[in-house]
Image: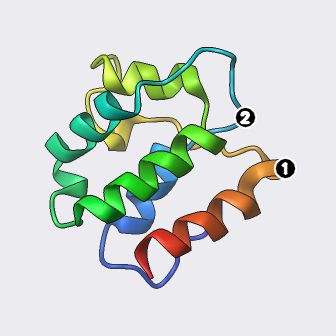
Amino acid sequence: MPVGPWPAGLGVALALTLSAAACGSSVNKDKLISKMKQDSTFKSMSSKEINCIADTAIKYGDKSKLNDYINGKKPNSDQVDAAVNSKNEKKAENALKKCVS
């Protein structure tokens, strides 16, 4: 996913938080937001931005990988796999741009 004209580290954080199409398990949005707020990559973002990014991650992201991130199996956003499915890449990218514009 190309990095846009966002604050330093934000493009990386967005790409790393997302991964490809849903795997069938659910993601607890409150837990995802809580984990993101603890992650230094997201510290400078507003609650509104984090909430929007979480919504986008849940909609377009790999649920299993998001749950691994929440549960500490992927300790920070830098280690979350960013393999965005080409089918969802543009949709996710456009949604994320709205989160931080």
Q: Residue furthest right?
A: 87
Percent x, y for residue 17?
Answer: 45, 45
Mark positioned earlier in the residue sequence (1 or 2): 2
Residue contact at pointers 1 and 2, CB within 8 angstroms = yes
Q: Is residue 83 visible?
A: no
Residue 83 placed where, x, y %?
Answer: 64, 41
For residue 5, above or below residue 28: below
Q: Label 1 amino acid? A: Lys
Could you tell me which residue is drawn at 84 percent across and 49 percent down?
87
- Residue under circle 1? 87
Image coordinates for residue 97, horizontal then vertical, percent: 54, 74
Mark 2 residue element: loop
Q: Residue at x 46, y 85 (%)?
A: 5
Is 20 left or right of 52, judged from the image as shown? right
**Placement of the N terminus among the 4 image quadrants:** bottom right
Which percent across, then down, holds residue 61? 60, 38
Q: Is residue 24 above or below residue 29?
A: above
Residue at image coords 69%, 16%: 24
SS state under label 1 = helix
Residue type at mark 2?
A: Ala
For mark 2, what is the residue? Answer: 21
In the visual, does 74 lie left or right of 85?
Answer: left
Q: Give the Cα separation between the discs numbered 1 and 2.
A: 9 Å
